[in-house]
Image (spheres, helix red, strand yellow):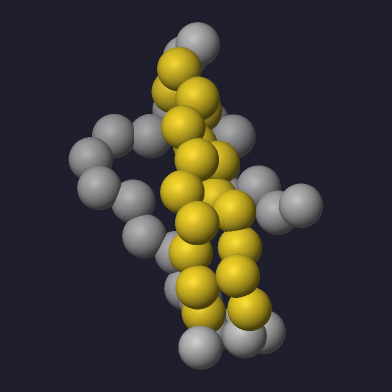
Amino acid sequence: MRFLAAAEQSGAQQFARGSLPAGAYLVKVQVGEQLTSQKVVVQ
């Protein structure tokens, strides 16, 4: 598991995928009490 930010963020957020090996990932984002997830494929 990798955490990108634990502090308050605003606006669009991006992260470098270059360090991730190819594969399918499940990205989870929590904002307050709301949690969403999205499948991301790195080729």
Q: Is residue 39 left or right of residue 1?
A: left
Whole-percent x and y of residue 24? 60, 70
Q: Is residue 33 above or below residue 43?
A: above
In depth, the one of 15 and 37 nearer the eye is 37
Whole-percent x and y of residue 26? 59, 53
Quadrant position of residue 6: top right
Q: Give the number of marks.
A: 0
Taking the spot 55% from the left edge, 50% from the top edge, the residue there is: 27
Taking the spot 34% from the left edge, 51% from the top edge, the residue there is: 13
Q: Is residue 32 above or below residue 37?
A: above
**Residue found at the far left of this picture:** 11
Whole-percent x and y of residue 14? 36, 60
Quadrant position of residue 15: bottom left
**Residue found at the far right of this picture:** 1
Q: Is residue 6 above or below residue 18?
A: above
Taking the spot 23% from the left edge, 40% from the top edge, the residue there is: 11
Whole-percent x and y of residue 39? 50, 56
Taking the spot 29% from the left edge, 34% from the top edge, the residue there is: 10
